[in-house]
Structures are given as C-alpha cells and as structure tokens.
Amino acid sequence: MKGEKIDPRFKIAHREALIGVGLVIFNFIWWFGFAYGLGGQSPDSYTYVFGLPAWFFYSCVLGFIIMAVLVTVIVKFWFVDVSFDEEGGDHS
C-alpha cells in the first residue's frame, strides 16, 4: 500500500464532491435565511412578490433559479470529464 500509486481520478472526484457539498450548504443557508428570516413574522405583516409571500418567493423560487444557474456554471466550467476505463489497460 505504501508504494502504491493513487489514481488521480480520486483527487478530481474528491474536489468535485467538496464543491457539491459546498453548493448544498449554500442552498440550505439561502433557503433557511429567507424562509425563517422573512417568514418568522406574523402573516398579517407579509409582503408579496408576484402574489407569493416574499419569504417563499426568495427562499424557494429565486433560490431554485440561483441554484440552477450556479450548478450549471460550476459543472460546465469547473468539473472535468473523467474516463471510467482503467488506466493503462486495453480491456476490449
């Protein structure tokens, strides 16, 4: 094990997994902040955006749009296409 070469695909996979975890944490903080920050008031004092309570619009609707854009950009520009074939071997 000590002299064994580590597959470089694991480094890529770990980096991309950490990016995914970061996106999940960002999404949760966004959702929680708006849902409980704006939604923790009396319903009589709610403001509305497009007929929806502001807390719902910002946490769920806008949050979804922002996450969809973020995930698309990150996958397109930061993630790498990795082959699942074993390195150095021709297994046809």
Image (cartoon, grey):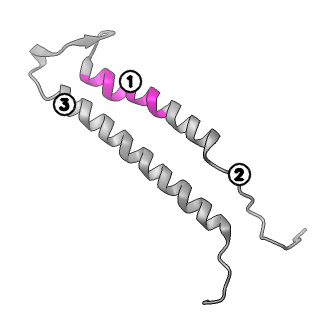
Provide residue 42's location: percent of width, then percent of height. Answer: 9, 21
Dot 3 and dot 2 residues touching (CB under 8 Å): no
Provide residue 36's location: percent of width, then percent of height. Answer: 19, 33
Q: Is residue 66 magenta?
A: yes
Residue found 67% across the figure and 51% down from its top: 80
Q: Is 71 left, or right, of 51 in this rendering?
A: right
Dot 1 and dot 3 residues touching (CB under 8 Å): no
Within 10 Å of disc 1 (Cα), the crowding (few <14, some 14-19, many 20+) is some
Q: Is 32 left, or right, of 1 in this rendering?
A: left
Magenta stretch secondary structure, dominant:
helix
Q: Give the foreground label among 1 and 3.
A: 3
Residue underneath mark 1: 61
Indicate which disc residue 37 carries.
3
Residue underneath mark 2: 81
The residue segment tinted magenta is 55-67
Viewer-closest of 67 and 73 = 73
